[in-house]
Image (cartoon, rainbow, N blue to C red):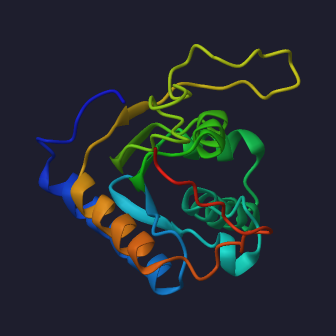
Amino acid sequence: MASSGEESSPDTLAFMELAIEQAKLALDSLEVPVGCVILKDGKVIAAGRNRTTETRNATRHAEMEAIDVLLEQWQKDGLSQSEVAEKFSECCLYVTCEPCIMCAAALSILGIKEVYYGCANEKFGGCGSILSLHLSGSELHNSGEIPQRKGFKCTGGIMASEAVSLFRYFYEQGNPNAPKPHRPLVHRAMN
């Protein structure tokens, strides 16, 4: 994490609130409550929410959903690969939870300009919690098989308590879509 969002601007808070609205939509759909918006020139151009359960596809994180909205639109507009890359380099992402390693790598490969996030992702975070894929120096060996990654500015801690509250609510309710254990849990007596 590059810095904390304790002194966020009113615009930053307003955009994060839009991401939280997307997370609430995910929660309403019994998805892990993560949401995001992508901005260009100060305007929201895409939004996404987790849809992994709905789509039965583990890659359908909020960030990937929003990225696909833009890729589809820009493809319809007939933009070349270099034009798409240029557009992504002018975009900022606001997401309720630190992007996971998969999403942080995708954002880096796409060349996003900046990411603002709510709470840290202590298990899978790709922007400082586990790996620092937002930095231009790579922790991954780039053998030419992996597309070149670019760094992006990253700011965390924006409305983190609101994001954590959504997670708490989700997990306290129990996840009806969680896989059932294949074998009974073993209860051990404490000695």
Q: Which of 190 and 167 is in front in this view?
A: 190
In the picture provided, is 18 more to the left or to the right than 55?
left
Image coords of residue 108 (percent x, y): 60, 34
Q: How many labels does the image show?
A: 0
Image coords of residue 134 (percent x, y): 51, 28
Looking at the image, which residue is at 46% across and 64% down? 34
> Residue reaching furthest right?
145
> Residue reaching furthest bottom?
28
Q: Quadrant of the N terminus?
A: top left
Instruction: Using the rendered image of the protein, determine whether residue 159 is visible from the camera's viewpoint.
Output: no
In the picture provided, is 114 more to the left or to the right than 63?
left
* Quarter occupied by residue 172: bottom left
> Residue reaching furthest front?
191
Instruction: Using the rendered image of the protein, determine whether residue 152 is visible from the camera's viewpoint.
Output: yes
Q: Nearer the viewer, residue 44 or 105?
A: 105
Looking at the image, which residue is at 56% across and 44% down? 100
Q: Nearer the viewer, residue 66 or 76?
A: 66
Looking at the image, which residue is at 57% across and 54% down? 188
In the picture provided, is 84 more to the left or to the right than 91?
right
Q: In this view, does 65 lie above or below 53?
A: above
Looking at the image, which residue is at 53% across and 40% down? 112
Q: In this view, does 125 lie above or below 51?
A: above
Image coords of residue 160 (percent x, y): 26, 52
Q: In this view, does 106 lie above or below 19?
A: above
Image coords of residue 54 (percent x, y): 68, 80
Q: Nearer the viewer, residue 79 or 178?
A: 178
